[in-house]
Image (tube, grey):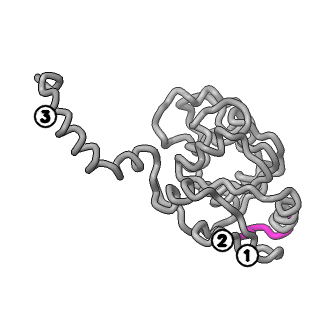
Amino acid sequence: MQAFTQLTGIVAPLDRANVDTDMIIPKQFLKSIKRSGFGPNLFDELRYLDEGQPDADNSQRPLNPDFILNQEPYTKASILLARENFGCGSSREHAPWALLDFGIRCVIAPSFADIFYNNCFKNGILPITLSEQQVDELFKEATSNKGFNLTVDLEAGCIKGAQLGDINFSVDNFRRHCLLNGLDDIGLTLEQSDFIKQYEAKRKAQAPWLFAE
């Protein structure tokens, strides 16, 4: 998993509340368990004017010109600004996969659905919870300043570049450690590889019949 330390990027304002995981990545695209390739179908129903199908050539599909991620410079956005209860609905891990594959590394909102929130950390995305007032101010600035940039510093716990001044945010120490060091569940396990090897050697000596080929 790619580490997250500091990110400076374009902020795409998605002015919708209760964006569920089926809106983030519709159910027909859930057949693959690969973590890549979902970016073209991120927000598929909002992004295109036709109905998306697996294995379709997305480059030939008609785009919705009113959708924010179809507009320049937001096609290169790495920070998504959203409203409350972002990521609600079913617990599909494909939702953060699709965001990440598009290029989104950080989502800022007043609140998140719990499972989506946890899945973001496990896939290298930083979800930041701010007050509704702070989010309102960021929306005003982002919508009036096309190409609005912010710098998100996880190590300092601070967002820089807004007219509000520096905005502090908090992430619990365990999740912060994992993101700063690029550790998903597998990476956390591999940190203990020496202990695992020692245990396996001890167990083999105690019960060699379990390891007989």
User: Vertically, is 183 above or below 209?
Assistant: below
> What residue is pinned by disc 2?
151
**Element carrying mark 2:** strand
Question: Which span of residues is magenta-colored?
Answer: 143-149
Judge from the rendering whether residue 25 lies leftward or rightward of residue 209; answer left or right.
right
User: Vertically, is 119 above or below 169?
Assistant: above
Q: Residue furthest front?
A: 206
Amino acid on which disc 3 is placed: Ala
Amino acid on which disc 1 is placed: Gly
Residue under the point 79% across and 77% down: 165
How far apart in space, not on screen, are marks 1 and 3 (Cα)? 59 Å
How far apart in space, not on screen, are marks 1 and 2 (Cα)? 6 Å
**Element carrying mark 1:** loop
Amino acid on which disc 2 is placed: Thr
> What residue is pinned by disc 1?
161
User: Vertically, is 180 above or below 64?
Assistant: below
Which quadrant of the view contains residue 17?
top right
Query: Residue 95 at x, y = what percent?
Result: 62, 40
- Dot 2 and dot 3 residues touching (CB under 8 Å): no
Say which label, 2 or 3, has the lower sequence index. Answer: 2
Answer yes or no: is residue 59 visible.
Answer: no
Residue 164 part of the magenta-drawn span: no
Which quadrant of the view contains residue 29?
top right
How far apart in space, not on screen, are marks 2 and 3 (Cα)? 54 Å
- For disc 3, the neighbor class at 10 Å (few under 14, some 14 to 19, many from 20) is few
Say which label, 1 or 2, has the lower sequence index. Answer: 2
> What residue is pinned by disc 3?
205
Say which label, 1 or 3, has the lower sequence index. Answer: 1
- Dot 1 and dot 2 residues touching (CB under 8 Å): yes
Residue 146 part of the magenta-drawn span: yes
